Image (spheres, rainbow, N blue to C red):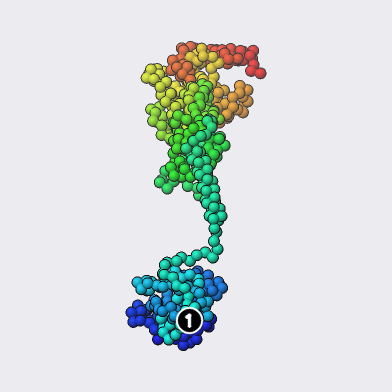
Amino acid sequence: MSEKTRKDDGLNQNDLEFDFPGDGQENLSEEERSFTFDEDYLEGSFPARQRLDPALYAEAEEEPAPRKRDFLAELKEALSGEWVENTREKLGQAFKKRNKPPRQYMAYVPEERQRDSVTVGMDLRADEMLVYDSELDEIDYTDEDDLPEMRDYMPIRFRRYGRTGIGGGILYALFVISVSIVLACMLWMYASDALALSKEEKTAVVYLEEYEPVGDMPTMNDEGQEILVDIDQVATALKNAGIIEYKWLFKVFCSFCDGETKMDPGTYDVSTKQDYYALVSSLHFGSDTQEITRVTFPEGFTMEQIFTLLEENNICRQKDLYEAAANYEFDYWFLEDMELGDPSRLEGYLFPDTYDFYQGEDANVALNRFLNNMENKLTDTIRDMAAEQGVTVREAIIIASLIEKEAGAADDRATMASVIYNRLDSGWKLQLDSTVNYVLGTSTFDLTTDDLETDDPYNTYVYEGLPPGPICNPGLASIQAAVEPESTDYWYWYAYEGESEFFTSYEDSQAYAAEHPYS
């Protein structure tokens, strides 16, 4: 037997005596058995009370009195007490003693559901209440008029205090339909861009810059693959060209397919008919969409001039070309004895010709085009003829570069070669203006005395013999003249207006020069 008090309930101390069946007590915890209905209950400290839904309880506490859940119903939930289906008289008396309206509803709980306290409590309507058996034991009430109406037990869910009605349902349906239409339109736009659906046909040329990490930016992705391009720059280029509409969507796609490691720097022809996958697949070196640029390199161009022209045509950057020229291990026999580290080792071997390049291709690939062409030109016949002249292939290339820079006309090359050989054989200095211009980085015929005295191994006015290396990249005619010179007694030449005059004496050459000044 337990005693309980509740200030707002309309029942006195004696009205709140409860008798619990033995089987009910057996299922109670020790804490629940020792529970007394005092301030502990009112303050909500009883653990079983805490198991009730806090939101529902708070909601009930805020409602007017007729909608509050009865504390006895909560006690039923807490103690799993047995609810009785007693006489209509006792039920009616119970409602009357609680000062409740006589026409309240009473829910009968089947015996098999009596212990399901949570379900029973949840199924009470706001105007319903349940009472304990002990509350009705000593009540004698026979007034049929005040008996409450009773309903059979049926699970009831808590209902909203307000109803939306048919109008609210229609508005809700319209809202759902509208949101669905908007989402469908957005998905269609994104799909059209990603899959190249219903897009106006358009072609454009885009340029992808080489990835240059700054600060702590990564150079490898999570799989250890080298990052080749900046995805943001690629997306911006495609967006500006009108090929894609949504940069963020393209960047998301590239993040899933590792686009930053699959696309290469360069210039490409692209179309709006290409979906995202086709774009990523085509923006790489050697693809059909990569733009090809044809560049012609005149005979006598220096390595610096060649590298400048390559960069101007967006083939390679000069710094990459110099790096490859100095340190890349090219597999050519004429480079075998040259040490790495000096880019000038390729001077003279970049054969001047017309080449087709992919824009943005690797520097070593571009240089290989020149070197492979040179290897084809240096035939066994050329090598044998150089040996007959008593020079190595490299010395022949150096002589050819001097001829290329000095010759005024193609017919003069073999004669000019004879002058060079005559001076070399006699131990004379070559005294060629072209070597001074190479040292100074100029191209003038009006060299000063100070210029001619520049102390540099390439200056043939100061040093005897051939310079350390070629001073330009000669064409085939000059190479041919270097290994097959004429046999003459000339020791001097004077080039004037595209033609060269040859002399056997210094006096004759000076007399001709006085008559044909460069000024």
Q: Residue 154 appears in which quarter of the rendering?
A: bottom left
Viewer-side residue, 395 vs 251: 251
Q: Position of residue 477 (x, y in %)?
A: 47, 17
Please tell me which residue is depicted at 58% across the width and 29% down the height of the picture: 440
Q: Is residue 479 visible?
A: yes
Which amino acid type corresponds to the residue marked 1 in the rendered image? Asp
Badge 1, how many Cα within 10 Å: few under 14, some, many 20+? few
- Residue 322 in view (yes/no): no
Q: Considering the numbered disc 1 on the image, is that residue within a helix, a strand or a loop?
A: loop
> Where residue 442 sits: x, y (%)?
59, 27
**Residue 178 versus residue 219: which sits nearer the camera?**
178
Q: Work out which quarter of the rendered image holds the N terminus and state it.
A: bottom left
Q: Which residue is mark 1?
A: 143
x 52%, y 34%: residue = 199
Q: Position of residue 224 (x, y in %)?
A: 41, 45
Compared to residue 417, the image places residue 271 above or below, namely below
Residue at 45% over, 72% down: 150
Q: Quadrant of the C terminus?
A: top right
The answer to whether residue 134 is above or below residue 244 is below
Measured from the top left, where is residue 504 in percent x and y? Answer: 53, 12
